[in-house]
Amino acid sequence: MYILAKKNKTVLLILSLIGISACHQSISDKNNNAHPASQEIILDVGINKNLIIPVTIKNKKYNFLVDTGSSVNIINERIASEISQPYPYSELPANYKRNFELISSASGPFTLNRNRFLKPTHYSIGTHEIQDDEVWISMDLSLLAEATGVDIDGIIGIPVFRRYSWQVNNATHRLTITKNAPSSFSYHECLGYSDHQNSMPEIFFNYNHISDMGFLIDTGSDLSTLPQDAINYLKNNHKEDLQAIDDSISAGANGLLHNTKFIFHNLTFDSLPLGEFIVSENKNQQFSVGMDFLSRFEQYAFIPTRMMFCYNATNLEKKNIKPVRAISIRYINQQIEVFYNSDDDIASEGLMNKDIILKANDKYYPPEKIDNVRDLLSNTPRGELKLTIQRNSEKIELSL
């Protein structure tokens, strides 16, 4: 999700035109005699696909989504009065007034209500207490809960992200946050990334003859995105590399976003082909990659003190990823519910909006595993998916 304060667009344009070559460190280049530094772990926690961590405020634990696409911490308006006090706009420092005159989001710019500012309080991530935040914002985060299957109480933004190192093991579904930088010797490859105020980390890809294409890393988004200009360019000049698949619905700062999804071909990262790569349109004219991209690595790490992205992976390529079916679901009332679909589109599957999914292939999935259910709905071959649903008070077995 993009919640970025207003930027100097001229500077961003110059950077994108010049291109910043990523510094590259291969495991074969490393000094084998070097000793990895010991790590000061402040939190080690299990995760699903999204980076959701416990945050302690006033001796109570809350669920926060780590979102590099947010330039400030955000508090769910549902709990704002419990943990904070309003920050009168008249008392807000001038630089914050300027920065937040216009917010950029994936769905385009929007104006932030002046009553949304909060005075921060002390809070802890694992063993580390943070006392020096200057401004928080309150927003309705109910759509994030629907998407992630977790009641999201707040968002950790990019300023806090830059304080720590973040190591993700996709094989074991663990996130380890350290106060100091981990050793890069634990990873096959390490690349430098670009970063600056009110922006996300930026890594670089190649497409055909175009090198060093900068993509922003948005950990608050599942999908990767291309700006409309890039989509139009591909349609007109390389239509074989862009295949429209279906319409997507996602949660954004402005509410629900309705975009067409595409399969993008011939993109490479660090000389590794991605094969087929799903993207959607970004109305903020930015290239970005989300958690769908990061989930392709076995392990990866962000080391902000070195502005370095490290990873373990021998193959990032995916093929035949066109969804078998398009069925939208959400988390609500501690259940996974079919929702946000055209009635006609899902009638052919025997489904109706508001059907509750009890089991998929005879297995119960708790709400926090909603992404697993999405994968099953999208990718299980025809005739191999069995759903147990509840419609009103009736339990129904379906074969899709």
Image (spheres, rainbow, N blue to C red):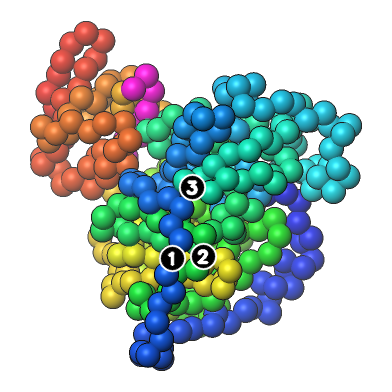
User: In 3D space, how far apart are the residues under numbered discs 1 and 2 (Cα atoms)?
Assistant: 6 Å
Residue 370 placement: quadrant: top left
Q: With 271 as the anchor, is 216 left or right in this view? A: right
Q: Are marks 2 and 3 in contact (CB under 8 Å)?
A: no
The residue that disc 3 covers is: 127
Q: Secondary structure at mark 2?
A: loop
Q: Secondary structure at mark 3?
A: loop
User: In 3D space, how far apart are the residues under numbered discs 2 and 3 (Cα atoms)?
Assistant: 13 Å
User: Which label's residue is closer to the chain start, 1 or 2?
Assistant: 1
Label 2 is placed on what type of residue? Asn
- Please tell me how many numbered marks the rendered image carries: 3
The residue that disc 1 covers is: 39
Q: Are marks 1 and 2 in contact (CB under 8 Å)?
A: yes
- Residue 328 magenta-highlighted: yes
Residue closer to the observer: 118 or 35? 35
Residue 371 visible, this orientation: yes
The residue that disc 2 covers is: 180
User: Which label's residue is closer to the chain start, 2 or 3?
Assistant: 3
Q: Position of residue 17 (x, y in %)?
A: 68, 75
Residue 21 placement: quadrant: bottom right
